[in-house]
Image (spheres, helix red, strand yellow):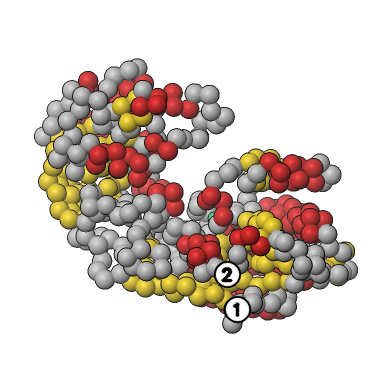
């Protein structure tokens, strides 16, 4: 999900050592024989793949964008060269599905803020942007500060206590109070209360007309990073009336406006309330409630317009497999996957292309090299090895969802899946391996003990690791 424009050969060399080890590891798990002679995972080949996939001509590999088709053809060609087979029931290594974009009309979508005698005509994409689940329409409303916008009875916490937000727009901070993580392993683990859509639902439940979200991270970030924290498309699933989702923020589209606002926009409101965001956070941490902060009036005029009708985009997962030598097993499939799409380009001048060398040309290159390596194993692995490169990951994990919803393989037949994401760069020089359960983590740790590889292994049981 991060955006990078560079990769370095040195990184690739570490990556190739890792992949070579990964090949042997997967081969061990799958109980297959020894590779044919010759090093098949090489730094040069990895770098070649990344160079092609991340070239400016690929235009950032946006789903439905101008450059992604060449990436799709390139992967297909590599899979064909390695002799990968198409799945039973499939007519091609390419599985086509459709996604729908109902983006916002950036010229007609507007935000004006007025507070403390000052006004701001906020700029779309620079000062504010609607969330994919935002409603469309026009509003002129008072803005009130509602802290983190959280009601958590189990933690005896309620930002809305004593606060009348009926018919008003609430401004809420991102994340949650620091004390919510007391006793948690990592300060970066948040409760479900911190999710944008939880906060929107909570605001609406208290009668609010809509939500403006302010994040501390935006407060100090330049415009570019504000913009890049969003997919600029909203893609629905396979039918246009199927509801909306974007990553973790899955929910039905609401009728209320939900906007993320930049530091400049937030500062105007906070200045009218004679505080900085940091002071606001400190006040909340010290036990003040939003109701107790006694803030003067602020107003927002919000206009949100969507493009009608939705635009349809063709998206393609490329996949092929190497048949196993022991197909009679209860779970005969191992999936090795990576997404190959990225986030396209941004508006403006200068270098406007998000090349996505690390995210995830690197993982895709890894898939291509692993497919080649395994195609040379004799005898073949016990399991069927399915290599998948997903599209439409960056716009809401839609490629892997399409794979499941189209019932391409029944999940009960899958022994496990390995997903390669951003393997081209590791500034801390440690490879991060995230496992879905302790059984796999232990297996990986045991294997790593015999390899000269610096890696950290951790367990994360979230569903989103699928793509
Ligand atoms: Zn990624």
Ligand 1's quadrant: bottom right
What's the residue at 29%, 38% (across, down)?
A: 202
Residue 29 shows up from this direction: yes
* Secondary structure of the residue carrying numbered label 1: loop
Q: Is residue 278 above or below residue 388?
A: above
Residue 268 shows up from this direction: no
What's the residue at 22%, 52% (across, down)?
A: 255
Crowd class of label 2 (few under 14; some 14 to 19; many from 20; radius 10 Å): some
Crowd class of label 1 (few under 14; some 14 to 19; many from 20; radius 10 Å): few
> Which part of the image, by quadrant, shows the C terminus?
bottom right
Q: Is residue 114 above or below residue 91?
A: above
Image spot of residue 239 (x, y percent): 37, 69
Disc ID at residue 443: none
What's the residue at 41%, 64% (across, down)?
A: 237
- Between 137 and 3, the one nearer to me in the picture: 137
Image spot of residue 454 (x, y percent): 74, 42
Q: How many marks?
A: 2
- Between 217 and 413, the one nearer to me in the picture: 413
What's the residue at 25%, 29% (across, down)?
A: 160
* Secondary structure of the residue carrying numbered label 2: loop
Q: Is residue 437 above or below residue 146?
A: below
Disc ID at residue 408: 2
Which is more N-terminal, label 2 or label 1?
1
Residue 2 as seen in the image, left or right of residue 240: right
| Residue marked by disc 1 | 89
Image spot of residue 117 (x, y percent): 11, 34
Residue 196 as seen in the image, left or right of residue 404: left
CB within 8 Å, label 1 to label 2: yes
Residue 153 as seen in the image, left or right of residue 292: right
């Amino acid at each position: 999900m991060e955006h990078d424009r560079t990769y370095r050969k040195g990184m690739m060399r570490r990556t190739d050592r890792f992949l070579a080890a990964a090949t042997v590891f997967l081969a061990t798990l799958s109980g297959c024989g020894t590779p044919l002679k010759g090093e098949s995972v090489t730094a040069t080949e990895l770098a070649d793949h990344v160079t092609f996939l991340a070239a400016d001509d690929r235009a950032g590999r946006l789903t439905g964008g101008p450059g992604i088709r060449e990436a799709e053809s390139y992967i297909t060609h590599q899979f064909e060269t390695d002799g990968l087979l198409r799945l039973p029931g499939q007519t091609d290594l390419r599985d086509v599905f459709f996604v729908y974009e109902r983006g916002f009309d950036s010229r007609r979508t507007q935000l004006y803020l007025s507070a403390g005698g000052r006004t701001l005509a906020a700029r779309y994409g620079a000062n504010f942007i609607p969330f994919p689940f935002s409603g469309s329409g026009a509003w002129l409303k008072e803005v009130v500060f509602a802290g983190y916008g959280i009601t958590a009875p189990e933690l005896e916490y309620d930002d809305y206590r004593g606060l009348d937000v009926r018919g008003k727009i609430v401004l809420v901070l991102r994340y949650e109070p620091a004390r919510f993580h007391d006793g948690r392993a990592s300060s970066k683990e948040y409760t479900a209360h911190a999710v944008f859509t939880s906060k929107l639902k909570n605001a609406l439940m208290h009668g609010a007309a809509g939500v403006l979200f302010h994040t501390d991270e935006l407060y100090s970030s330049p415009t570019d990073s504000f913009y890049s924290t969003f997919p600029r498309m909203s893609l629905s699933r396979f039918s246009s009336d199927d509801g909306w989702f974007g990553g973790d923020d899955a929910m039905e589209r609401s009728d209320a406006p939900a906007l993320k606002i930049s530091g400049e926009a937030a500062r105007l409101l906070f200045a009218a309330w004679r505080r900085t965001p940091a002071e606001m956070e400190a006040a909340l941490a010290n036990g003040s409630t939003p109701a107790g902060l006694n803030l003067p009036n602020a107003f927002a005029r919000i206009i949100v317009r969507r493009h009608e009708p939705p635009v349809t985009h063709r998206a393609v997962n490329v996949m092929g497999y190497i048949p196993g030598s022991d197909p009679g097993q209860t779970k005969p499939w191992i999936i090795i996957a990576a997404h190959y799409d990225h986030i396209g380009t941004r508006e403006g001048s200068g270098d406007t292309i998000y090349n996505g060398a690390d995210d995830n040309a690197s993982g895709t290159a890894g898939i291509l090299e692993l497919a080649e390596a395994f195609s040379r194993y004799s005898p073949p692995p016990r399991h069927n090895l399915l290599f998948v490169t997903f599209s439409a990951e960056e716009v809401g994990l839609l490629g892997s969802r399409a794979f499941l919803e189209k019932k391409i393989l029944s999940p009960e037949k899958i022994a496990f899946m390995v997903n390669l994401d951003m393997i081209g760069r590791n500034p801390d020089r440690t490879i991060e391996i995230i496992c879905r359960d302790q059984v796999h983590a232990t297996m990986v740790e045991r294997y790593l003990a015999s390899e000269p590889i610096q890696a950290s292994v951790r367990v994360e049981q979230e569903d989103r690791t699928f793509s």
